[in-house]
Image: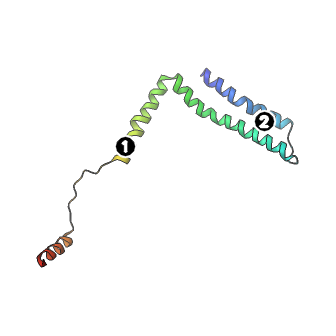
Amino acid sequence: VLMRVFVFFCLSLPYNAHRIYAINFPTSRNTPMAYAISRLIQAILLSMIITNYMVNFYIFIIFSSRFRRQVKLVLVRKCWQRWRYWCCHINTRIEPDNNIEGRNSQMESDENI
């Protein structure tokens, strides 16, 4: 939990600091270069916050053996078996050929030869 708090703090602090700065000192749309730079910085810092969710997954994988077991259970046993059934399902049934009309026409053509 301590690592999650540390990572969340490190990833969200720059965005929050930029938002506080942008609220206190707004950039006007009349200066397009400054406005574009501000929006670019905001987009980059927002993507850092979004990566927080991805980083949490890897933190749990590294530090929690229970989480690793659960991920293995879900990915290997459940998802892999479903994928294997959907993609690699081989139909081993023998189905009868009920096409009687096709056989009769074949027999008639054999008799004509």
On screen, residue 32 above or below 108: above
The picture places residue 22, in percent across and down from the top left corner, at 82, 37
Callout 2, which amino acid? Arg
Q: Residue furthest left?
A: 111
The residue labelled by disc 2 is 19
Circle 2 SS class? helix
Q: Residue furthest front?
A: 113
Would you say 87 lies left or right of 30 here? left
The picture places residue 111, in percent across and down from the top left corner, at 11, 76
Would you say 81 lies left or right of 28 here? left
Location of residue 18 (image quadrant): top right
Circle 1 SS class? helix
x 87%, y 37%: residue: 25
- Which of the pair 8/38 is nearer the observer? 38
x 16%, y 73%: residue: 104
Callout 1, which amino acid? Arg
Mark linked to residue 41: none
Closer to viewer: mark 1 or mark 2: 1
The residue labelled by disc 1 is 84
The picture places residue 39, in percent across and down from the top left corner, at 77, 42
Q: Quadrant of the N terminus?
A: top right
